[in-house]
Image (tube, grey):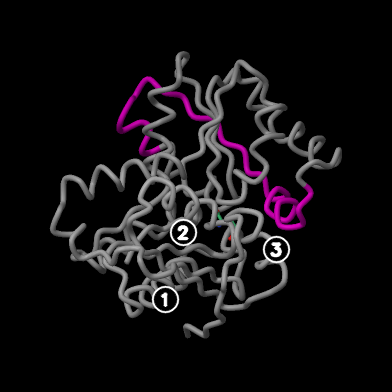
Amino acid sequence: MIGIFDSGVGGLTVVKQVISALPQYKIVYFGDTARVPYGNKSPEIIKKYSQQDLEFLLKKGAQLIIIACHTASAIAADFLREKYPAVPIFDVVRPGLDQANQVTRNYRIGIIGTENTVKSGAHKRYLKEINPQVQVFYQACPLLVPLAEEGWIKRQETRRIVRYYLKSLKKNKIDTLVLACTHYPLLAKVIAEVAGRSIKVVDPAQEVAIQIKEYLQENPIVAGKLTKSGQRHEFFASDVSDKFKDISHKVLGDKVNVRSVDII
Ligand code: DGL
């Protein structure tokens, strides 16, 4: 199976893209809803939680892991790869940046994410590695996760807050904006409207699905081990709230049967 984990419900935006790019494989998802958010926790705790999330998915039979959470990707991906060298582990930081690097014309790229994602500097390091010409402009947007979870997608208040967050990025003349948080695709429409036509908005979830598809084509042995999706996808969360059910319905369309699990 393809194992996907996130700090909560937002990672379902990644599940959606993976199902659409790789409909033939079964997915097992874990959302750590009891301990969300990761965005404001210490790096040590994020690494510890991420390792527990990954262990749970491996026990469920995952052969390939996607870290859907940007905060966990920025802080714990290399740590997990070192601990589990035999497991293919994908994060959501690099694919979005590869795409942003292809899209930008003026080499000025904006990154929006949680406080921790911004503080990690992971995006800046990777972009400098692949293209030293690129200038990176960060903006932490801590209010966007709760707004997305509350379903305040079309509210004027949300538009105003997005306008506030994008102000300095626009002033810095970015032409590309990376949605470096699982929840932001839920607000993609208002973010794109506020950003305006001169800024291309990149959703890393789409690119991660494409990169995994390519990886599986090049690694048929791993692909052969993955369970085909004749069986239903499995969804687990450490706390199954009505909000989780609501958002999963919004993101994945049909009713998702989420089971509660204690992973500690
Ligand atoms: N999943 C987190 C991320 O993508 C957002 C929610 C949180 O802070 O845990 O960064």
Horizontal arrangement in the rendering, residue 178 relative to residue 127 (left or right):
right
Please report the residue visible at 39 percent of the width from the left and 26 percent of the height from the top.
Answer: 101
Which residues are drawn in magenta? 125-152
Alpha-carbon distance for marks 1 and 2?
12 Å
Q: Quadrant of the N terminus?
A: bottom left
**Which tag is nearer the camera, tag 2 or tag 3?**
3
Residue placed farthest to the left in the image?
Answer: 221
Q: Position of residue 102 (x, y in %)?
A: 38, 23
Q: Position of residue 176 (x, y in %)?
A: 53, 25
Residue type at mark 2 is Ala
Q: Which mark is residue 246?
A: 3
Q: Is residue 139 magenta?
A: yes
Alpha-carbon distance for marks 3 and 1?
26 Å
Q: Position of residue 241 (x, y in %)?
A: 69, 74
Note whether ligand 1 is within 8 Å of mark 2.
yes
* Label 2 residue SS: helix
* Label 1 residue SS: helix
Q: Quadrant of ligand 1?
A: bottom right
Residue placed farthest to the front in the image?
Answer: 230
Q: Which mark is residue 238?
A: none
Q: Earlier in the sequence, mark 1 or mark 2?
A: 1
Residue at the disc numbered 2: 72
Please report the residue visible at 58 percent of the width from the left and 65 percent of the height from the top.
Answer: 8
